Amino acid sequence: MGGSKSKIDSVSNLTPEQHQTFSKLLKDFDPKAMTDMFQTSVANPTRQEFQEKTLPGIQERFIAGGGSRSGALNRAGTQAGANMESSLSGQLAKLLGQGQESSYDRQAKLATAPTLEMFQQDKSTVGADLTKATIEAITTALLVL
């Protein structure tokens, strides 16, 4: 009676693709990845457009009015930049909040979704009549949410 331990293998009823999809869906929300994506695809292009189009437009209006060296020009550019940054911050906050809520909702739906294993464990339940195809259809429908 040596110290050998028996190994119990786990067998999944999911295809490798389904397993990968479930793993991604159960993953915790990653605010850093969402922030990086927002910075790359929204904030940086917006800032670049501000530098290349908005600020020169503000300067042109002041030059046309004879105020190219006034403090008002500096204040207008600074205020426009502050407004843009405030808007970007608000958009990012909203995006992060929605991402977190979506992650919680998705995880809750998956955690309460019936699985084939649940029905196999208790053959006396009403759900025992469900076929694997039906459960896969339910799972697919949840993935669309």
Image (spheres, helix red, strand yellow):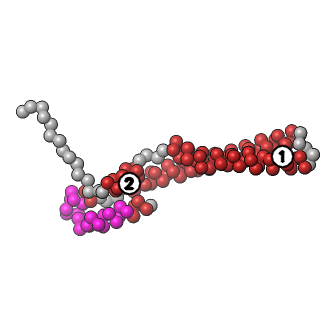
Left or right: 34 with respect to 3? right
What's the mark number on residue 29? none
Residue ID at (55%, 44%): 36
Left or right: 28 with respect to 135? right
- Observer able to see residue 87: no
Residue ID at (37%, 50%): 23
* Residue on which disc 1 sits: 59
Say whether disc 2 or disc 1 marks the residue closer to the N-terminus.
2
Near-viewer residue (73 or 113):
73
Res 128 quadrant in image: bottom left
Bounds of the magenta segment: 118-140
Residue furthest to the left: 1
Under circle 1, the secondary element is helix
Amino acid type of the residue tagged 1 in the rendering: Gln
Q: Residue 34 placed where, x, y %?
A: 53, 46
User: Badge 2: few (under 14), some or many (20 or more) residues near its Cα, within 10 Å?
Assistant: few
Which secondary structure type mostly characterizes the magenta part of the structure? helix
* Residue on which disc 2 sits: 21
Q: Residue 11 placed where, x, y %?
A: 23, 51
Is 27 contained in the magenta span? Answer: no
What number of labels is visible?
A: 2
Name the image quarter holding the C terminus.
Answer: bottom left
Name the image quarter holding the N terminus.
Answer: top left
